Structure formats: C-alpha cells, structure tokens
Amino acid sequence: MQFSSRLPIATHILLVIQLYGKDFKVTSDFLASSVGVNPVIIRKTLGQLKRANLVEVNQGIGGTTLKKSLDQISLLDIFHAVEEDEDLFHFHENPNPNCAVGKNIHAVLGGKIRDVKSKFEKDLDSIKLDSLIEKFKES
C-alpha cells in the first residue's frame, strides 16, 4: 500500500525553511532543488501550507517563512493542509444488498476504519516538527 507523497514533501519544505531561511532566500526553486521535484509542485504545496496558515509566501521578491514555531506544527497539521481527500480508505460504492457480506460491509468495517484513522491522526498529532529538526542538526 502506498500513500501520497504530499505529507513528506510538505514536511521537507517546512524543515528546509526552518534550517536555511535565516541564511538564504527560500524560494520555490531553492525548495525544489532540495526536495528533488518540479518547482510547480513546490508552489502548489506552498499554497496549501499558506491556506493552512503555516507559511508566509512573499510574492514578487520571493522567499518563504514559517508563521508558527516548530513546536506548534504537528504532522497532523501538515496532513490536513496538503491532503485533499483525507479518507484513508474508500468503500466500494455498490456492494450487493442481497449478499450477507455486501449488505453489512459498511456497517461492520466502517467503525474499524474510523478507529484506525483516529489512531493514525493521534499519532501524527503527537509528532511536532521541533522533534524532527533536531535530527537534522545532529548530522
């Protein structure tokens, strides 16, 4: 199973802004060179992070800064900012209502999936960017 790369890319962006923002103008080209993706993807992600009030993007002169301190930004904040459809699993639309499994699958499995998502979000919320940044400062 593979999830989208939006959360890791957005996290990468925020860490680069924190680590290099005092010494360099952090532009989409600068970020793209670190992340290894097209600047268009960076600009889209920056737009999402801006709408979530996590970054400030200086139009025209360029450069991006964080709007919150790292201890106030969790991976859940980033996940909510960049994931357009936050459902981890999608149910198939038309299970057979004449089948014992088909007519009950949503009710039986839905609660379990909601529990998994809740635990997933709780874990993401417990990880703040300040705990990650220390790993980069060590190397």
Image (cartoon, rainbow, N blue to C red):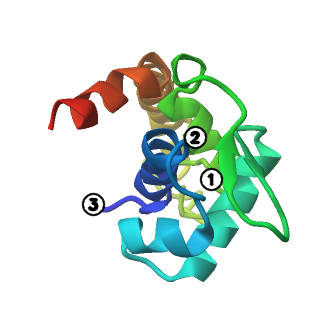
State the CA–CA distance, disc 2 to disc 3.
21 Å
Q: Position of residue 53 (x, y in %)?
A: 78, 38
Q: Position of residue 116 (x, y in %)?
A: 41, 29
In which quadrant of the rendered image does the N terminus lie? bottom left
- Which of these two is toward me, 122 or 68? 68
Q: Secondary structure at mark 3?
A: loop
Mark 2 vs mark 3: which is more N-terminal? 3
Asked if marks 3 and 1 touch (Cβ < 8 Å), the reply is no
Asked if marks 2 and 1 touch (Cβ < 8 Å), the reply is yes
State the CA–CA distance, disc 2 to disc 1.
6 Å
Picture quadrant where residue 129 is located = top left
Q: Badge 2, how many Cα within 10 Å: few under 14, some, many 20+? A: many
- Which of these two is toward me, 11 or 80? 11
Q: Is residue 39 above or below residue 44?
A: below
Instruction: Name the residue beneath numbered marker 2.
Output: 78
Q: How many marks?
A: 3
Looking at the image, residue 15 sits to the left or right of residue 92; the answer is left
Q: Residue at x 49, y 33 (%)?
A: 75
Instruction: Name the residue beneath numbered marker 3.
Output: 1
Picture quadrant where residue 22 is located = top right
Residue 43 seen in the figure: yes
